[in-house]
């Protein structure tokens, strides 16, 4: 079975069976990643450009490794919006890159919708690696893969997402992905960091973190952006940690063996206690490992690969 | 036929038949770039170092892609003149890199003649990717390839180059390349941005842009450097645009179907109107595509490859 | 024979026969580096991450070339301690990278012991590419290779190391390596830049540079860090140069044909005169060439390769 689309821009646009196809393909890719010789020729002669307008170590590295293990040529372009190629607009940059005939362009950009601007005009497959507070679809897919791998299923599970819901592309993509595969989602956070129209999320919304995590199968903590701290949004990191941080005590009130996730990087002692992040039910490093597999799967499927299974 | 030189430093040093050899080789390389699997083993086991002392997305990426499609190992070094390796001089940096046995070093540097300093002392082939206001020979070659591809010939054609002629390495290399293959060149720009000794250029010089572009086969607009704006060189971008910008009205006064070129990145609405840049006679993106082919050709020829044709 | 260790963190931990194994393997690697096609499949499907928390051109490039010639996939991460991945700790960064399944992580970090933090917790092989003023073991190994190559032996030779001994990881690793293979070491420098407990070094210590270099087989000059200049440590660069710089006159007082080394980058005219650096007995560029070979050898041995010889 093949993925019948050129780009991956949002989770919103994906059908449920497309999500399952990507997850199944990622399962096959994990086998490659576990080999002693991590190299297959699937994307030999294909060119991947990593176009990052925001600093990123983990996501850029994950895509770069994914591309290289599939034998693609990988080109990194790290820039900032203010200085990019002497003021060239995003679309001009995109068209210039397209003229060099890449097969895939992975883009991270601070402006919501930036990847779609490229996708509408470029022949290359565009993968959204995070666009402002909009979407981060590969993160959502790797989160599903991680949960499915551990619990054997997705449908009917309950996930509690805790933190800065309103500014988080991880939350936005995650909630949509979970809803599409039949999971129940609850979100919790300070009122200033909850969305104004929570009913649009398809999630239960609360300011009571303990209510949110009670009986949840999975708790997903979001990274707190320290720059939100100040009189308007966040009183103090200590206060935030006390009210919303995932402490050992709080985990004890949740279901036994509840799975713990976090997209990283961690603010240890702020949104998550070190003992929880490093505990036996933490899937945080599995998420990273599965990130490479998801990105391999997407690179493979978007450049015309077919899933072996299905 | 082989290119009998170690380095490509300037257009000035090239014979006309060398230029044609490079263009013919680039034609073959374009075929590779159009394949589904863009990879040939020509430079397998060869090492290319991209040594960039000025920020560059397009030229660095173009050389990197060219090297990778030919199976070379590509190493990027991006630095600035002030901080490079703790104050090491260019020549010491060059000798250090030479000691690592690269086959080709591509250098961009703000100082005119910097590539020659390396070429005189290093065994590796040196390619000048822009040295101050001196030369940018690969740009001139890709421009010729682009014109020849569209018009089937070069000799006897007339090109008008408009903008900051006196500070432009693109203009300097371009004019010399065009003269060597028998093209006529006219240059136009504000008097403050025209060379003091225009007769040395081998080009007709005017401050009247419409006179320059009348009957020209090709109009090549140069990027205006915003930092030249001020009391001495450029009154204002709006004024520059009005007097020298390539507007739709101005194109209408030129020959029907006149070809439009620009080395990029574009200042849309300053030196070129968006409708012109994106219009049917614009070759701006062909220039980018041909840039990869020219760089593949040079990497191939300078490391000992022979042209299949000729 | 194989190297029975996961990591290379310090020279201190190495046995003498391990040092010889690495040098012998590097000799074989030099043969590859001298080929027209510099590529062997030894590390195909292995992933090397260059994790550099300090700027470096030469060491990073050397490891990158070494990895690529062995066919490894090489990922560069350049960052600074202050901004790294939004404040993530070194260990969290390390565990995140480990979750992407690299085979080797090369780390340069300003904090002594940083590589060991990773080595203790990560499955990947860790290579210390310089940790603060602590150790720089690959530099010491390439220095030994360079001396052995020229003089045919190491045991019984005398080396004089001159400069800022107390802050130099090059000196610290170098002295230990030389002592382990049976060389005699003398160090010289201003009293403010000599170690407080010189007897721990296993080297003779003096402030008289001419006494140190008399009868030495090799003189190794250290790079002076200009930031040490000031009232407390270094009176002035001119004064330093006069008292401790390796001038032609000073070389004439040493043994005829004494070999000259420097880890680079050079401060020409400060710690070393240009005529000496570029003279017939200078091994400075051999050190760079041998650096690639040593790093190839270590990548090969640490990922399970066996030395052909022995």
Image: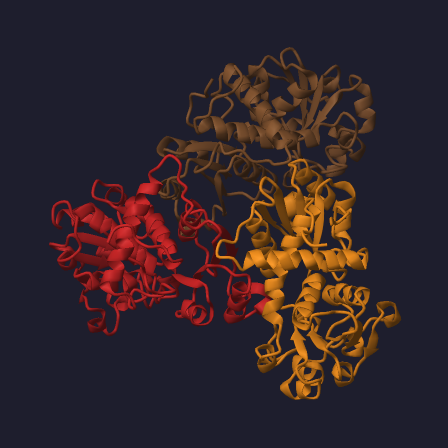
Chain colours: A orange, B brown, C red
Q: Residue furthest top?
A: B156
Residue B278 percent location from the top left of the image: 77, 32
Above or below, comparing residue A147 to residue A42 in the picture: below
Residue A247 percent location from the top left of the image: 64, 84
Q: Residue at x 66, y 79 (%)?
A: A237
Question: Which of C28/B275 is in front?
Answer: C28
Residue A215 percent location from the top left of the image: 75, 83
* Number of on-image labels: 0
Q: Which residue is drawn at 71% across and 45% down?
A: A125
Q: Which residue is drawn at 66% across and 26% down?
A: B191
Which quadrant of the rendered structure holds the C terminus of chain C? bottom left
Above or below, comparing residue B188 to residue A165 in the picture: above
Above or below, comparing residue C265 to residue B273 in the picture: below
Question: Which of B305/A14 is in front?
Answer: A14
Instruction: State left or right for residue A219 relative to residue B291.
Output: right
Residue C189 makes an appearance in the image: no
Instruction: State left or right for residue A72 relative to residue C180.
Output: right
Which quadrant of the rendered structure holds the N terminus of chain C? bottom left
Residue C173 percent location from the top left of the image: 29, 63
Question: Which of B44/C45 is in front?
Answer: C45
Residue C37 makes an appearance in the image: yes
Instruction: State left or right for residue B104 relative to residue C240.
Output: right
Q: Residue at x 59, y 50 (%)?
A: A67
Res. A58 image quadrant: bottom right
Above or below, comparing residue B217 to residue B112 in the picture: above
């Amino acid at each position: 079975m093949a993925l019948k689309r050129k780009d991956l821009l949002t989770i919103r646009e994906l059908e449920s069976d497309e999500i399952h196809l990507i997850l199944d393909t990622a399962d096959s890719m994990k086998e490659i990643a576990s080999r002693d010789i991590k190299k297959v020729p699937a994307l030999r002669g294909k060119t991947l450009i990593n176009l990052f307008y925001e600093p990123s170590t983990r996501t850029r590295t994950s895509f770069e490794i994914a591309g290289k293990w599939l034998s693609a040529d990988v080109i990194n372009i790290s820039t900032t919006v203010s200085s990019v190629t002497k003021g060239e607009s995003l679309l001009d940059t995109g068209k210039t890159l397209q003229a060099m005939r890449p097969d895939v362009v992975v883009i991270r950009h601070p402006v919501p919708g930036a990847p779609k601007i490229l996708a509408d005009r470029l022949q290359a497959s565009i993968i959204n690696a995070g666009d402002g507070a909009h979407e981060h679809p590969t993160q959502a897919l790797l989160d599903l893969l991680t949960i499915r791998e551990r619990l054997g299923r997705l449908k009917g599970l309950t996930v509690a997402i805790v933190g800065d819901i309103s500014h988080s592309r991880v939350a936005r993509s995650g909630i949509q992905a979970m809803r599409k595969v039949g999971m129940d989602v609850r979100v919790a956070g300070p009122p200033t960091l909850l969305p104004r129209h929570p009913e649009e999320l398809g999630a239960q919304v609360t300011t009571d973190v303990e209510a949110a995590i009670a009986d949840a199968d999975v708790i997903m903590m979001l990274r707190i952006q320290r720059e939100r701290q100040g009189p308007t949004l966040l009183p103090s990191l200590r206060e935030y940690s006390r009210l919303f941080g995932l402490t050992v005590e709080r985990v004890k009130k949740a279901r036994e063996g509840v799975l713990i996730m976090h997209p990283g990087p961690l603010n240890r002692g702020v949104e998550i206690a070190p003992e929880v992040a490093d505990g036996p039910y933490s899937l945080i490093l599995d998420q990273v490992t599965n990130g490479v597999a998801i990105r391999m799967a997407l690179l493979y499927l978007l450049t015309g690969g077919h899933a072996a299974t299905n």
